[in-house]
Amino acid sequence: MKKTILRLLLAAALLPLHAVAQSITRLNPTNWWVGMKNSSVQLLVYGPQAGTLTYTIAYPGVKLVKANTVENPNYAFLDLSIAPTAKPGLVKLIGKKGTQTITQSWELKARDNAPKGQGVTQADFIYLAMPDRFANGDPSNDKFADMRDPSSDRANPFLRHGGDLQGAAQRLGYLKDLGITAVWFTPVIENNQPLTNEGGTMRASYHGYGFTDHYAIDRRLGGNAAYKAYVQQAHAAGLKVVQDAVYNHIGNTHWFIQDLPMKSWLHQWPTYTNTSYRQQPITDPHASQIDRKITLDGWFVPFLPDLNQQNPYVANFLIQHAIWSVENFGVDAWRIDTYMYNDQPFMNRCNAALLAEYPRIHIFGESSVNNVVDQSYYVRNNINFPFKSNQPGGLDFVLEGAMVEGLKEGGAQRMYEALAQDAVYQDPTKLVTFLDNHDHDRFLSVMGEDFDKFKMGLTWLLTTRGIPSMYYGTEILMKNLKNPTDAEVRKDFPGGWPGDQQDKFTAAGRTARENEAFTFVRTLATYRRDHKTLSTGKLMQYLPENGTYVYFRYDATGTVLVATNTTDKPVALPTGRFSERMSGFSKAHNVLTNETLNNLNTLQLPAKTAVVLELVK
């Protein structure tokens, strides 16, 4: 595939200038706004021989600072400066060569006052869903004959199923009722990729991680208008929206891969080189350069070309698209895919650019590591690393592993130990916590479908520090392991499609146990939403003893005690050991059962149960 790219590049470079008429077919960003804090924009201009034109700008307040040409004559990169006095309107971009003149319009818009970049905090509860597998509101956009993958078949777990943004919008009331305050979708950007052969099975890019046009929301999800409408409807319902960003790689049919701007646009190797997926060479002070290079610059998979973010044109393209997405669609937070495989100085620059425009936005990346030192490397930390990350938050894979493995083993020691190392982070409350996701085995199945362990895990998730995130369907006991494939943990949400035999978006469509799980999650989620103690309170934990684990969330507004009995027998737990936090309280309200405890000297903990008590003086 790489040899083909280079042949195309060389062929374009050697083509006689008179053989192709100059024209402009793409401008990225597709538009910009007046009044942005950063007044500079680098406009990517693309079309046959577009790089051979001489450009001028005819618009008050917009200045062409520099026109940059690159190896491929089909590209020009124009550095623009937009003055504070510039007004909204259509900027005329004029390109000339000899007697030929081409005029192209590029819009400068007025910024609106709609909410955007609001961020997510510990006060939020994030719901992660795959749009293709959540709900189908418009069957007419399930497939398009002119796309590289024209198929849609719910009977095939590896193909697209037709879920879309309109369907997701129709379920906003369901999420709000559940106590969700923010929605994170796997990427919604166009993935116009053909089916790929993986282990003899043809698979669609329904997950969204192979972009083919950064400035287009996938038509099968409804397109740009549907996404903008979804965000507006979510905001009107009081929910925030998290966008899933992918900087490290793109789909191999991305439009600029078909006509590469320059060889250094990608990480090029003499022969195909995959990343090792090993985290250690990045933080290891003894690591070899080749191990480090393979981790960072090796391709994630053969059909996802690896972008070279040290190339300044690539970096500008990605940063501007991130800002454009927030401003255009109004998203509130930014989850970054495969964070550890990106060039980290680039990530700092990108994060800084987003935070400069949107100071409240939250950014949390995916660095799938198994220890707090490596995890802290990718966020603001208190360790003397040679490189200092400015990422505000991250996905807390370490705590996920500690909670899940601890519950499997029947104890809380791992969770205690993970939290005991929070001093490595500048602000551990900005980490996003979870029990599973679209790449992991579903939590219920990992627990062996033990409902008591399931409830303990959800209790920990919704009461400990951090920003909790839950994978779609967990609240209705969706299960499965990634055996034999990831598709097993990416099933359709029952009731999301017209004609589904069961509609688990409704209580009537759920079994008694599913309703019990839904109510359990809703009770904790709405309590968390309505009580600041769980969103602003400090955490104090006590050493686990004899299968019990106790911690407190507390602030000036209140104190919440969480006590877990991980054993299979009831426990009478004396509370004298916890007087530091319980002194002055005489009774408690049980959040999960709505009971009142009038004596706090001893807590009666049923087997395999976590109780949540709001202490009362």
Image (spheres, helix red, strand yellow):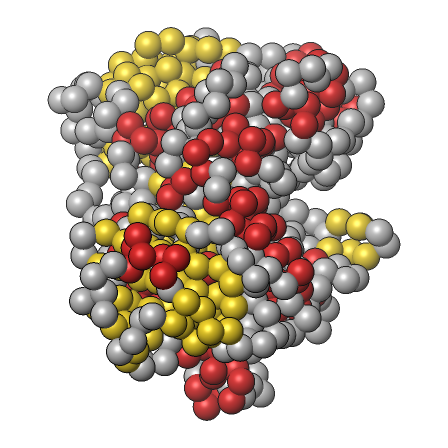
| Residue in view at x 58 percent, y 50 percent | 414
The answer to whether residue 367 is left or right of residue 535 is right
Is 521 left, or right, of 287 in this rendering?
left
In percent of width and height, residue 76 lies at 48, 17
Residue 138 can be seen, yes or no: no
Which of these two is toward me, 439 or 14?
Answer: 439
Q: Residue at x 37, y 44 (%)?
A: 429
The image shows residue 202 at horizontal and vertical percentages of 78, 56
Residue appearing at x 50%, y 77% in the figure = 606
Residue drawn where x is 13% and y is 22% of the image: 85
Whether residue 92 is situated above or below residue 167 in the rendered picture: above
Q: Is the residue 472 above or below the residue 349 in the image?
A: below
Position of residue 590 in the picture relative to residue 21 (left or right): left
| Viewer-side residue, 358 vs 271 | 358
* Among the 4 quarters of the image, the one containing residue 178: bottom left
Counting from the top left corner in percent of width and height, residue 334 is at 41, 42
Query: Which of the pair 476/100 is nearer the observer?
Result: 476
Observer-nearest residue: 197 or 614? Answer: 614
Task: Reply above or below: 136 against 250.
Answer: below
Q: How many marks?
A: 0
Residue 537 position within the rendered picture, expressed as x and y whole percent measured from the top left: 28, 51
